[in-house]
Amino acid sequence: MVLLITLRQIWFLSLTESHSLRYYYTSMLNSNDFPKFIHVGVLDDVQITYFDSVIKKDIPRQPWMQTSLKDQYWEQETQRLIDRQRLSLTNVEIAQRRTNSSKEGLNYLQYTSGCEVLEDGTVTGKRQYAFNGQELISFDLEHSIWVAASPYAVSTQNKWNSNKDDNEYKKQYTKRICVDWLNTYRGYGQAFLNRKVVPEANVYYTNGHNVNLHCLVTGFYPRSINVTWFADGVPVSGTHSTGILPNHDGTYQIRVTFQIEPGDDRNHVCHIEHSSLPAPLKIIWEKGGSVVPGMIGAIFVLVLLIFCIAAGIYYRKHKAEVKKRFPSCFTHGESDNLFSSIHTSQSSPCILQQVYWDRT
Ligand SMILES: *[C@@H]1O[C@H](CO)[C@@H](O)[C@H](O)[C@H]1NC(C)=O
Ligand SMILES: *[C@@H]1O[C@H](CO)[C@@H](O)[C@H](O)[C@H]1NC(C)=O
């Protein structure tokens, strides 16, 4: 036991980044095309589990979650979430009634819970409810009490706070059990979670109202990074950062920008410190040289690609729907091309616009 605690403390001390385990519960009324209840587990920005009311199963979202956890785990989680679903759907009905929200509209209750271990080992955590995007109530971990954020939740706050044992249990759960699971899952995924991916970096300027120098760093993992502009070896003050943003592939990006004064002849260098790099990466801003055309070219190709994919998905989805609703549109030669059939078959009874009107 003592050994375990000591090991855990060493583990915390060796942390250089914060880590989190978060659960998101969404329950919805009148969500026609969407499952009524969805539950997602997220470890350090990586989705690890998924459950919804249609599949009625908790499933792994990472291969290392699947291989590390026995069937029994998934069965127990499934049962817990089926119970949770029943409770959540009752809660969303209560919230709808209490807030006098339209019975026909989409009404949704979001609940998030989880824990985070900060760089210095401090544990924080969250339990929070929101209804139709407005915060209702959240748990104050330090004081073990629920705090209503909306007048609709005051009666709930009083009811829940009358159960002091339960509140204390919730606090202990967040501070200990949740953190134990966080460490367990991190252990299972350590090869994946501890991987290092080297950033790509680019410096470029944009010339609008002001001239701005940008340092764009992308594709790196883990998340922690330092990006600093230097002018003749001195850190530039007044830089603006986008903050660290997620990429679609599990890596991250950041852009740090500052406004350069006309006639500033100093040497501008972007320094990048990241755990994947043996030494800071230094990208020198070549005066007069421009990375902009290359960047714009790359962005243009990317935007074009995204557009084509989106158009493709949209087209396929709508074609299937139109086919179902207006089979007569598809009985002739043009049947494979939705768009040409709109224009060519004027005498046909298929009124395609209707599909879109119905949807709005
Ligand atoms: C609830 O909504 C109905 C219809 O919109 C309205 O007549 C009624 O006064 C509302 N009640 C409350 C308590 O806001
Ligand atoms: C960023 O800078 C801080 C302060 O100098 C340092 O402690 C930290 O290790 C740096 N982070 C990385 C990823 O190099």
Image (spheres, helix red, strand yellow):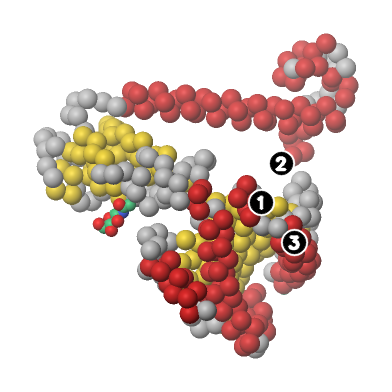
Write down the residue under mark 1: 66
On the image, the x and y values in percent for residue 53 come to 78, 55
Which amino acid lies under the numbered mark 2 shown in the image of this protein? Thr
The answer to which image quadrant residue 76 occupies is bottom right
Measured in 3D between alpha carbons, the distance from the residue under mark 3 to the one under mark 1, in whole angstroms, is 12 Å
On the image, the x and y values in percent for residue 114 come to 56, 66
Where disc 1 sits, the SS reads helix
**Crowding at mark 2 (Cα within 10 Å: few <14, some 14-19, many 20+):** few
Q: Going 79% across and 29% down the picture, which residue do you hit?
A: 320
**Crowding at mark 1 (Cα within 10 Å: few <14, some 14-19, many 20+):** some
On the image, the x and y values in percent for residue 20 come to 50, 62
The answer to which image quadrant residue 26 occupies is bottom right
Do residues under tags 2 and 3 come within 8 Å of each other at their CB atoms?
A: no
The vertical placement of 287 against 219, above or below, is above
Q: Which comes sooner in the sequence, label 2 or label 3?
A: 3
Which amino acid lies under the numbered mark 3 shown in the image of this protein? Gln
Q: Going 81% across and 16% down the picture, which residue do you hit?
A: 335
Q: Visible in this render: residue 78?
A: no
Q: In this view, does 333 lie to the left or right of 134?
A: right
Q: Is residue 41 left or right of residue 265?
A: right
